[in-house]
Amino acid sequence: MEPITVVGMIAAFCTTSAFIPQVVQILRTGNVDGISLQMYSIFTLGVALWLGYGVVLQSSPIIISNSITLALAVSVLGLTLSKRRKNRMHALRLVADNSDIAVAPAANEELATAA
């Protein structure tokens, strides 16, 4: 294996594995407050494009690292969307259960459309 390929594989390992703590933290704590959906969406698109680029070039370091990174980035996006939806549903239920008559129908309507 060429030295430059080894450097590429080490770089790919470092940048890809950097996402693992974020996924683990979300799974462990359920906290997604600090996650930017816009950033992760743009990043995920970029990784998908890098993966396509690697496939065209038939570059193993690019293909392997971006496949794993894409899976991790999609996991962060999916977990974030799921957790935020659950949090919103919970908050809406609290509002519907604890509000006066004038507010509760609006919260119940939003609950029905969000489900």
Image (tube, rainbow, N blue to C red):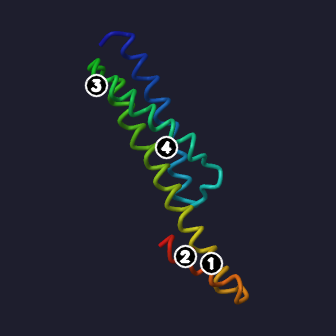
- The x, y position of residue 106, in whole percent, is 63, 79
The answer to which image quadrant residue 109 occupies is bottom right
Q: Are marks 4 and 2 in contact (CB under 8 Å)?
A: no
Q: Amino acid at mark 4?
A: Ile
Q: Amino acid at mark 1?
A: Ala
The CA span between labels 1 and 3 is: 48 Å
The residue where tag 1 is placed is 107
State the SS at label 3.
helix
Q: How many marks?
A: 4
- The x, y position of residue 23, in whole percent, is 50, 49
Residue 97 appears left or right of 7? right
Structural crowding at the residue carrying mark 3, measured as other residues with C-alpha within 10 Å and reported as few (<14), some (14–19) or many (≥20): some
The residue where tag 4 is placed is 20
Report the residue at 44% width, 29% height from top: 13
Quadrant placement of the N terminus: top left
Q: Are marks 1 and 2 in contact (CB under 8 Å)?
A: yes
The residue where tag 3 is placed is 55
- The x, y position of residue 92, in whole percent, is 62, 75
Q: Amino acid at mark 2?
A: Leu
Of label 4 and label 2, which has the lower sequence position? 4
Structural crowding at the residue carrying mark 4, measured as other residues with C-alpha within 10 Å and reported as few (<14), some (14–19) or many (≥20): some
Q: Are marks 4 and 1 in contact (CB under 8 Å)?
A: no
The residue where tag 2 is placed is 111
Of label 1 and label 3, which has the lower sequence position? 3
Mark 1 vs mark 3: give the one in front.
1
The CA span between labels 1 and 2 is: 6 Å
The CA span between labels 4 and 3 is: 24 Å
State the SS at label 2.
helix
Report the residue at 46% width, 34% height from top: 16
